[in-house]
Structure formats: C-alpha cells, structure tokens
Image (cartoon, rainbow, N blue to C red):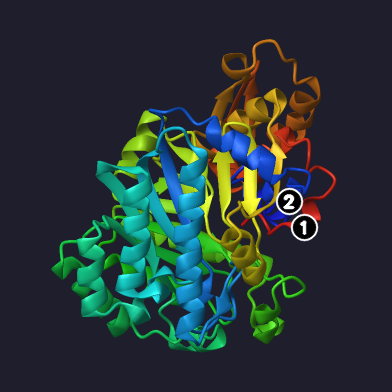
Amino acid sequence: MSAVVRRHAERQVPRYTSYPTAAEFAADVSPLDHERWLRQIGTDEPVSLYLHVPYCRDICFYCGCHAKMARRDDVVRDYRDALTQEIATVARLRAAPLAVARLHWGGGTPSILGGEGLARVVEALDRHFVLAADLDHAIELDPRYVTEDLARQLAALRVSRVSLGVQDVNSRVQAAIGREQPTVVVAAAVHRLRDVGIDAFNFDLIYGLPLQTVETLRQTCRTVTAFAPDRIACYGYAHMPQRKAGQRRIDAATLPTSAERLAQADAIAHELLAQGYVRIGFDHYARPDDPLAHAAAAGTLHRNFQGYTDDDCDTLVGFGASAISSLPGGYVQNITDVPAYLRAVGGGGLATARGCRLTTEDRVRGRIIERLLCRFSVDLDEIAPDQGFADELAQLQSLAADGLVDVDGRVITLSDEGRAVARVVATVFDTYSRDRLGRFSVAV
C-alpha cells in the first residue's frame, strides 16, 4: 500500500454497522418508544431476528464482544428462559405475529444453551411468530464445542448456515490470545456439520493479533481455504484494554505495528483472491457463486450489525442482553448487564436500555454511507437531490488529492486504494463522530 493509504489507515473510525453508530445511542429512548416502534412493523413485512447469547465457557483474551464466562448450567438455563419470555413479551405487543425471514444467533457462544436449550427458544419463536418455510437460519459456533450430537440437533432446527470462529491457525498466536484450537478440531467440526447436511459456512479470521506475521496469516488462509467455506470475514483486531479487561492479558509489545497490520491485510487479500474468492466490501470475501457475491455484483449488498449481508429486510428485532434492534422509528439496544436484563424481562417488560431516534437526515446519510461501503460509489443526486452537501464535497477534495476518491460533480467513487480505507471516506458524511473519532478502531 502507498504511504497515503498507510497514513489514512491509522485513523480511528467507526465500522458503520449502523448509522448513527451505537456510540451515539442515548438513554432517552424508552421502553414506550421501543413498544411503539415494534407495533409499527408492517403485518406482512418480512423481518430478521437476532438472538444474543452472552455466555462462553472461557473468554478469549482478544474478545471485544458482550460476553462473559458461565460455568454453571443453571445460569445458562435462566438466560434461556429469559429469551423465551422476551419473545413472548414482544409477541404480546403485536396485533399480528411477526413474519420472520431470517434468524441469526450470535454471542458469546450460542451453542452453550445446548441442543435442547436452542430447541426451546426456536419453539417459542415458532409459537409466537411465523417462520418462513425457507428460513435463513444462521448461528455462530466455536469449533471446539461442535459435537456430533450438537450437529444433529442444529440440523433438526433447520440451521442453514454456520459461522466458525477460527481467527488464526498458528499455535503460538492461539496461545497468545487464549484460544488453543488445533486445525484438526476445526476439521472435525466442519466434517460433523457437513455430515448432517449443513454445508454453508462462514469462517471468521482476525489480523493484527499478537505474534502474527504475514507468513502466519498466509498459512492460515491456505489452511482455511482448504475447507472451502462459502464466506470468509477478516476483521482487524481492536486493542482496547481500557474498555475490555480481558485484553489486558495480551502483551501489547507483541502486537504488530500499523505497517505490519497493513501488510497482513494485503497478504490476506492476495491469498484469498488467488484461491478464487471475490472481495466483498473492505473485510469480507466470498466464493463467486455465493449469494453475498451475487448481491455485491447486483448492487444489492447491505451492511448491518452482522457486517456485510444480502439481507434485504428493513427491520431487525434483537433479543437477549445487549441485542440491538433496527425498528421503524430508530435503533434500540437492550440492557447489557445480564442480571439487570433478567430482572427486566422477568417482570414482563421490555429490556430497553438506550437507543437512537432516526431523523430524515440520519436516514439519508445512512444510505450514503452504506452505498460508499457496499458499492464504493454514490450519486448524491439519486439519494438526496435537494441537499447541497457543500461542506462534505469540500472535505472530499483532500481525499481526492490523495487519490482515494474521484468526485465527478455529485458522484463520488472510491479508487482501488480508497476501498481499503472506505470507512475513512464514510466519516465525511458522519455528522456525529467527526470530533470523536478517537473512540474507534483503526481503519485497517
């Protein structure tokens, strides 16, 4: 990468899985707002559901998710019961049941609920909502806990896609991040899932981890592509020990430099493209025949709280501690503290903690940012013909001078180098975070 890209890649910017970002959520969004927005979802409108399970048996040092360790089974059972209660509460607020097109489990480690626990939650969903016959049902899994029994149970629940957290296959890196996971463990998980008919896979990789080098990541890519996953997501590690206590167990002296991170991202791209994958946005890759690749080619790619997706549902309803919903009136996030979440749901109410009311301006700017991150081009006249954006167009001139974007009237197109730092370009249209970018992860 050029020196210009290296300079911009060190900027701390949002990931833009929403706009406004979660950093702008405030406590003035109340349970009454949450309830009203749930009622506003159209009767026949297909929606996506997200189920967050915050528990893991062990916490990896690098983890930046809302997750905590659970050793006791009764703690997990209580959480499962709270999920079913929250589902019933949302259903009670609706005049007609939600029509569910997509269902995604995240965490944490959702499979910690066990096959029976997962089934109990899915039964509650089926009882209160209308699940599509061709439901897109995805779950995030830790390969170390994928047993033959779990695989069979997931197949029985009509799980159609799994996301495996691989991160890195190098044993020294794994030891440094507290996640020792030999490749044979990943292979066994893939084999067990494919044996029961689950054959759509996403693998998660992370660069910027302690002791990683370009060569270890090249080997990781070669190992991973041998399993032929449909999708590979490659995230840059965000080291924020001041916010995530577990990350304090990582020796910062062993982390790669900014220049090394850029070289690692380049190496990943080179290896995956050489193996026939196509690039999706700035951190995803997919096989050419995957729906994600089709969406990227057709200009229908989207970006939400799961990252890049072909999900065309406008509404996302989140369940579980810390889960975020995208509703007609705005964003709502549930209480993050699990005991407080359990109390709120156990009392028969919503677990609303904070959120953001979406203005017309927010929606316009959100569409612009999504186009920049998904299509790498946006025509301002198509989205907002009556808005001038004089300040933004002026700011873009410096990025154009650096060769990152081309500005042709009101059409903005990212160059090949600009795509690597697309999030930096997106911040030009972000009126909330311009003065607070230091709170986020680096662009690459």
Frontmost residue, 329 versus 3: 329
What label sits on residue 96 in the rendered view? none
Instruction: Tell me the mark number nearer the camera, choosing from 2 and 1.
Output: 2
**Residue 281 shows up from this direction:** no
Quarter the N terminus occupies: bottom right
User: As drawn, is 416 to the left or to the right of 112?
Assistant: right
Task: Name the residue: 66% across, 59% down.
Answer: 335
Residue type (three-letter) at the residue carrying disc 2: Ala
Q: Amino acid at mark 1?
A: Arg
Q: In terms of secondary structure, where does tag 2 sit?
A: helix
Q: Residue at x 20, y 70 (%)?
A: 152
User: Which residue is more in the foreground, 212 or 42?
Assistant: 42
- CB contact under 8 Å: marks 2 and 1: yes
Q: Residue at x 50, y 73 (%)?
A: 78
State which tag comes first along the sequence, 2 or 1: 2
Quarter assignment of residue 225? bottom left
* Badge 2 density bin: few <14, some 14–19, many ≥20, Cα 10 Å: some
Q: Closest to the observer: 167 or 88?
A: 88
- What is the distance, in whole Å, between disc 2 and disc 1 at their CAs? 9 Å
* Mark 1, secondary structure of its residue: helix
The residue positioned farthest toward the right in the image shown: 435
Which residue is labeled 2 in the image? 23
Q: Is residue 37 above or below residue 68?
A: above
Q: Which residue is the site of mark 1?
A: 439
Callout count: 2
How far across and how far down the image is residue 195, in percent? 14, 69
Residue 341 in view: yes
Q: Is residue 41 left or right of residue 256?
A: left
Residue shown at 63%/65% (left/top)?
A: 343
